[in-house]
Image (cartoon, rainbow, N blue to C red):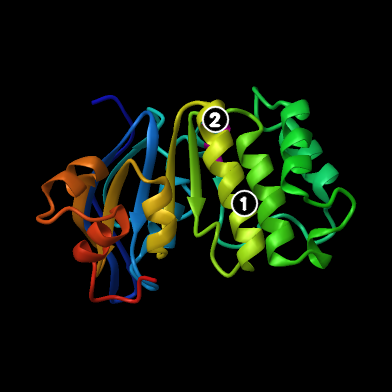
C-alpha cells in the first residue's frame, strides 16, 4: 500500500499526562481515512503532530515523504489543512487569506479558490473576526482544496455547525476532494460524518489507535449486515461519539 502518512510509535505527553501512547498507523495515498474518537481522545494533538505544529516525545512521523519536525514548510506546501478553529488573523478576509497562501503553495489555484468560495456561499469581504464559525469553516475549506494538495487534513471541520451549513460544507468536501486528487484524513467524533465519507477508519481511544480497518471489509464482516453507521457504532459504542 502506497502511503501518504506513516506514523510509528508516536508518544506525546503534556507534563505527566500521556495524550498519545505508542500510536502507529498508515494512511493510503488515495481515498478518505477518518480518525474517529470522542472529545479528549487526542485527535487534535495527533493532527498537530502531523503538521509539525506540535513536537513529540517518541516515535517517527512521515507526511508526504517528509518529516514534519524537520521539514514543516515542505509538509505544509503539500497539505491542505483545516484546523478545528480558523487560524487566520482576525483582520483578514478571504481575499487577504488567499493572497497570503498564494505565496506558500507552489500549486495554488486562484480560480479554483474563488470558485469553491462561491459554491460554499462564503463571504469575500467579511473579516475572520466578524465571521460565524460556519463562514470561517467554508473559507478554510476553500483554501485547503485550492492548491490540489497531496493530502487534505481536516480537524473536526463539521463540528458545531448549524445543520444547513454542515450539509453544505460536507457536500462540497465529498464532491470536490476527489477532484483535488490525493488523499484526505478527517478527524471527527461524528459517526454520521464518518459513515458518509470514510473509505478507511482509525479509532483513537485513550491515546491509542484501537481500530484500523477498511470500511467495506468492516461492513461485510459484521454479522447480520447493517449500515456503515451501525458498523462504526459497534466498533465504538462506549464513548461520546455522536
* Residue at 71 percent of width and 38 percent of height: 116
SS at badge 1: helix
N-terminal-most mark, 1 or 2 = 2
In this picture, is 48 found above or below 162? above
Quadrant of the drawing holding the N terminus: top left
Crowd rating for badge 1 (residues with CA inside 10 Å; few <14, some 14–19, many 20+):
many
Q: Pinpoint residue 185: horizontal percent, then vertical percent.
A: 42, 44
Q: Which residue is mark 2?
A: 149
Give percent across and percent down for residue 41.
33, 68
Camera-side residue of 20 and 192: 192
Q: Give the secondary structure at mark 2.
A: loop
- Stretch in magenta: 76-80
Q: Using the image as rendered, state which of residue 57 and residue 221 is in the foreground.
A: 221
According to the picture, the residue beneath numbered tag 1 turns out to be 169
Q: Is residue 78 magenta?
A: yes
**Picture mark count:** 2
User: CB atoms at circles 1 and 2 under 8 Å apart?
Assistant: no
Horizontal relation, residue 85 to residue 24: left or right = right
Q: Position of residue 147 (x, y in %)?
A: 63, 29
The reply to whether residue 55 is visible in this rendering is no
Q: Farthest residue in the right direction?
A: 125
State the predominant SS element of the stretch in magenta. Answer: helix
Q: Is residue 76 rendered to the left or right of residue 39? A: right
The answer to whether 154 appears left or right of 172 in the picture is left
Q: Residue at x 77, y 49 (%)?
A: 121
The label nearer to you, 1 versus 2, is: 1
Relative vertical location of residue 225 with respect to residue 145 in this rendering, above or below:
below
Task: Pick the quarter of the image with the C terminus.
Answer: bottom left
Whole-percent x and y of residue 154? 50, 50
Amino acid at each position: 500500500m502506497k502511503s501518504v502518512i506513516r506514523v510509528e510509535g508516536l508518544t506525546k505527553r503534556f507534563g505527566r499526562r500521556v495524550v498519545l501512547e505508542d500510536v502507529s498507523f498508515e494512511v493510503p495515498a488515495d481515498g478518505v481515512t477518518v480518525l474517529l474518537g470522542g472529545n479528549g481522545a487526542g485527535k487534535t494533538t495527533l493532527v498537530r503532530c502531523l503538521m509539525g505544529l506540535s513536537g513529540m516525545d517518541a516515535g517517527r512521523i512521515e507526511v508526504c515523504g517528509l518529516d514534519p519536525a524537520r521539514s514543516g514548510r515542505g509538509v505544509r506546501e503539500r497539505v491542505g489543512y483545516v484546523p478545528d478553529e480558523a487560524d487566520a488573523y482576525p483582520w483578514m478576509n478571504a481575499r487577504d487569506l488567499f493572497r497570503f497562501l498564494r505565496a506558500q503553495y507552489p500549486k495554488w489555484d486562484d480560480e479554483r479558490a474563488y470558485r469553491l468560495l462561491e459554491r460554499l456561499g462564503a463571504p469575500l469581504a467579511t473579516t475572520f473576526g466578524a465571521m460565524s464559525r460556519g463562514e470561517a469553516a467554508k473559507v478554510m475549506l476553500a483554501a485547503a482544496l485550492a492548491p490540489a494538495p497531496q493530502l487534505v487534513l481536516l480537524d473536526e471541520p463539521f463540528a458545531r455547525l448549524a445543520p444547513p451549513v454542515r450539509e453544505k460544507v460536507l457536500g462540497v468536501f465529498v464532491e470536490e476532494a476527489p477532484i483535488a486528487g490525493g488523499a484526505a484524513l478527517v478527524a471527527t467524533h461524528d459517526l454520521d460524518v464518518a459513515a458518509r465519507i470514510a473509505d478507511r477508519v482509525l479509532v483513537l481511544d485513550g491515546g491509542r489507535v484501537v481500530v484500523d480497518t477498511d470500511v467495506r471489509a468492516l461492513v461485510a464482516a459484521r454479522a447480520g449486515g447493517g449500515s456503515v453507521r451501525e458498523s462504526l457504532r459497534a466498533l465504538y459504542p462506549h464513548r461520546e461519539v455522536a
